[in-house]
Image (spheres, grey):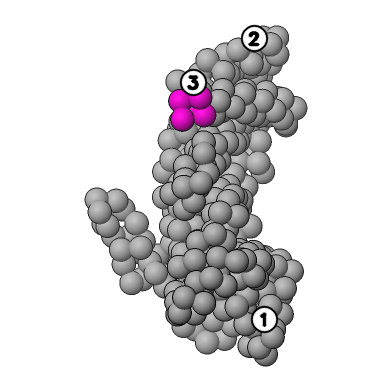
Amino acid sequence: MLRYLVTRIFQLVLVLFVVSVLVFSFTSVMGNPVYLMVRENATEEEIQAVVEYLGLDKPLLVQYGIFVKNALKGDFGMSYMYHQPALRLITERFPATLEIVIVAMLLSALIGIPLGVFSGAYPNKISSKIIMSLSIAGISLPSFWVGMVMIFFFSLSLGILPVSGRGDVGILFGIKTSLATANGWRHIVLPAITLALGNIATILRLTRAGMQENIRQDYVKFARAKGVSRRKVLFGHALKNTMIPVVTIFGLQLGSLIAFTTITETIFAWPGMGKLLIDAINSADRPIIAAYILFVAVMFVFINFIVDILYTVIDPRVDL
C-alpha cells in the first residue's frame, strides 16, 4: 500500500507539472490581456506600466517560474474581467457546477445500472431490445441539441420548468445550495437530465456487457444449482463482479462532467465553472483559464485515486 501511495504521488506531481507547462504555454499565446486592462485611449507609458505589472516584459522561463511559484500558493492572479482572485471565482462557482453533476451522476447510476442488469440478464426480451435502442440514441444525441429540445418542450411549450438560472438557494448541511429548495430543484432538473443522458447510456451498455459475461461463469451456475434466487444471483454475485469497469467509467465520467459542463451551463445560463470558463476564454482572461485547468487536473487525479481505492472494497482480490 505504501509503495502504491508513493507511486501515485509521483504520478500526481508529474501530471501536474505537464499540465502546468501546457497551461502556461497555452495562456501565453492567447490574445494580449493588456488592452483589456487599460482605457481605450491609453498612452504608451500606461500600457508599458500594465505590461510590467503583469510581468509580461520578463523572459518566458522566468514567467513560468513565477507562475508555478504562485500556483503552489493558490495564487493565479487577479481576473482581468472581475478584478477578483481567479481561484476564488472558481471555488465560488464550483458548488453550482457540483449540484447538477451530482444529480446527473445519481440519475446515471440509479437508471443505468438496473437497466443494464435487466437487459444483460434478459437480452432476448423485446423490452431489453428497446432499452438498447434508446441507449444508442442517448450516446448519439449531442447535449446541446437535447438541452434545447427540452427547453422548448418543458419550458416554452408546457411551461412546467424554468428556462434558465439556478433558482433559490437554501442551507443544506451548512452549505448554500439550490438542492435545499423546491425552486432550486425545478431549475436543476433540465440541465441535470441533459448531462445524464449520455452517461446513462454508457453505464447501461457497460453493465449489460459485464452481466452477460458474468452470468455465464461457473460461480453463477453453481449458485443457481444451490437454489439461490435469480435476483440474488444477479445483484449479489454477477453485478458485484461487473462493477469494477463500471466504477472506473463512473469515476471518469464524474471528472469529465465537472470539467466539461460548459455547453450545458451556457445553454441553461447556469452560473457554474463552465460558463465562467467560456466567458474567460472570450475575454482572454488568463488567470481564470489557468486556475480552472489546474483545478480540474488536481480533481481528476484525486477522483482516479479514490476509484482505485474503491477497487479493493468491491473486489478484495485486487491488490494495490
Is residue 139 depicted above or below 257 in this figure?
below
Q: Amino acid at mark 2?
A: Val
Residue at the spot of label 3: 72
Image coords of residue 32 (percent x, y): 70, 28
Left or right: residue 92 versus residue 42 is: left
Quarter occupied by residue 60? top right
Alpha carbon separation for disc pair 3 and 1: 52 Å
Left or right: residue 160 versus residue 62 is: left
Residue at the spot of label 1: 123
* Part of the protein shown in magenta: 1-5
Q: Pointers 1 and 2 in contact (CB under 8 A)?
A: no
Q: Amino acid at mark 1?
A: Pro
Q: Amino acid at mark 3?
A: Leu
Left or right: residue 170 versus residue 63 is: left
Please tell me how crowded label 3 is: few (under 14), some (14-19), or many (20+) other residues with Cα within 10 Å: few
Say which residue appears at 67% left-offset and 74% top-offset: 135
- What secondary structure is found at the residue carrying circle 2? helix
Quarter occupied by residue 269? bottom right
Alpha carbon separation for disc pair 2 and 3: 16 Å
Q: Nearer the viewer, mark 2 or mark 3?
A: 3
Is residue 183 depicted above or below 277 in this figure?
below
Q: N-terminal of the two: label 3 or label 1?
A: 3
Say which residue appears at 53% left-offset and 70% top-offset: 222
